[in-house]
Image (spheres, rainbow, N blue to C red):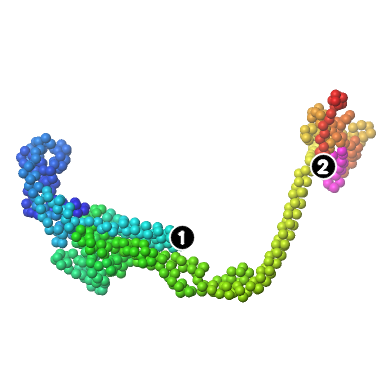
Amino acid sequence: MDIFQIPLDTLVVDQENIKEIQCGICLQILVTPRQCKNGHLYCLSCIQQSLKKNRHECPQCRCSLDLDKLSRSLFLEKHLRNLNVFCKNHFRMEESPSFFGNSKSPGWVEDLEGCGFIGPHENIENHEISCSFRFENCKFSVNNSNNINSNRNNNNNNDNDNNNNNNNNNNNNNNNNNNNNNNNNNNNNNNSSNIVNSFSSMILSLNNSIHGNCSGFSISNNSSGNNSPQVRINQKEIVVNLKSNMVGNPNSEDGLLTTEGNSGEDHNNSFSSSGSGCGGDIIPIECGKIRFKDLEKHYLVCPFRPIQCNFCKFEFTFNSIKDHETNCDFRLMECSQCKSQIPKKELKGHLDEKCPNQIISCTFGYCDKTFERKELNNHLNETLAQHIIMMKQQQQEEISLLKKEFSNQLQLKDEKIKTLEKLIKEKLSEPKIKIDWKIKNYLECKRNGYHQSEKFIIEGFPFFIGIFTDGDNNESKGFISIYLFLDTSDIPKGRCINTEFSLKFNNQRDPSQSLNREYKATFPIRDGSGWGDRRSIKTHNLESNGYIKENTLLITAEVTIKKILWLVEESQCDKH
């Protein structure tokens, strides 16, 4: 509830006769009065709601009634227009004890410092528009002060690129202070009941002389005779009237607390979030609504009035200027070395680049001497020859290290080249195929006289190994004949393959006694299909010297492809 929502019942001067003009339903002063045929009066909205509930009768005399039967009361309407009422600025909100425990309920009471104008109800609005006791918003509202500080902070950020972190922290502090004010004001609006209770408790504590032990506070009675306590801070002329300027219902969004005073010298103390008043920190208060007649006086002490920073010349709110100036990047600070006065944002750069008394290292890379910056030129002139010698020695050491590093790198490159050559050689080497043939039933093969392996393909040529257990002719009887055969029934047309191969009988008792024979042949073979040895090993030696184990004979063939050739038939040559 705000100042514009004061009930008409409260504004009426003659409270004794108010019952005569009350609605029979809501028991408030009639608004747009309507009557039944027997003269019972109701607000139009109240009787409409009653009739909507299917009660088509007068709530008092029970006569039949509907909207068409309602009539106006011209006499009463004129009486209401001429009703003497107070200006709404004659009242203020005050808490009074409720019937439930210690809680308090808000209510409108007459403010002896408020407007005393009385006039007809129909004309009172014209007076209220120009009433000097009306409430207005402070032009230095929190939103405006936020805009001021935000703009100043943005300008500071643009000017302080070299100190972004410090600037951001300072500006954020300023913004946080203002945001805290906004948050507190929002909390005052949204949770105004709790805040009013807390301030009422503080006012009661003031009346109970709790501040008697605090030299920073004193109580003075209002000259108008009301009971609104005024708290003077630090005995200055600043007066915070906590009750007389409270506007609106604390339970509504418009419940605001305002301040008044004559001087702004220490006014910020009453709004500081870190004040030293009794009972802990004092919550920052929004200016809120101020009586029009007090606006000019308020502007002189408003905690949100714009104040120019003495260092950066930007504007900030009065209640934040102290924190800003403490952290302002343009604040002059004393250099710890040369005692010069340097702006805060330039202090680091001054120490790093300009301060004549700052200890620095010699700018010559090979020299480790340290001295004050102002001695640099003298040092360079006095040690020029030494610097040249040092540079020569250092360069020689660097050349030696470079040579050593180059030698190591060259050795690594040579090793890498050899490794690559080896890999290339292995890749380009002639392909070698190894075939292991296990004859599991040797005695049966011996009875058959001949046995051959499964076929294996080399470059498209089908090969197999064949053995004759008692020779393949009369001259080789008593010997094992072994051959590498090419299956001539299924060979690539027009091609031949040049090979080197070996056929080995593996000694399963002593591998070092294995019998290995090497051969060279080009397949297909003219006038034959295989190549090997008719008398490779005596059958008796094969069977008695460890080549046969558990009736199994192991034969290994390794074939190396030397060349693949294309054949041209004679008939084709004759045609050319």
Which is more toward the observer, 198 or 162? 162
The residue lying at 36 percent from left, 62 percent from top is 314
Q: Is residue 53 above or below residue 253?
A: above
Mark 1: which amino acid? Asp
Residue 286 pos. (x, y %): 28, 59
Which is more toward the observer, 151 or 567? 151
Residue 165 pos. (x, y %): 45, 61
The crowding category of the residue bearing disc 1, from other C-alpha atoms within 10 Å (few below 14, some 14 to 19, many at least 20), is: few
The residue lying at 10 percent from left, 55 percent from top is 118
Q: Is residue 573 above or below residue 204?
A: above
Hey, which quadrant is residue 197 in on the image?
bottom left
At mark 1, the secondary structure is helix
| Residue 513 painted magenta | yes
Can residue 220 be spotted in the picture?
yes
Mark 2: which amino acid? Lys
The residue lying at 24 percent from left, 71 percent from top is 236
Q: Is residue 492 left or right of residue 7?
A: right
Q: Residue furthest right?
A: 475
Query: Magenta span covers which residues?
Result: 500-520
| Residue 510 painted magenta | yes
- According to the picture, the residue beneath numbered tag 2 turns out to be 549
- According to the picture, the residue beneath numbered tag 1 turns out to be 161
Q: Is residue 298 above or below residue 498?
A: below
The residue lying at 51 percent from left, 74 percent from top is 357
Residue 497 pos. (x, y %): 82, 34
Q: Which mark is residue 79?
A: none
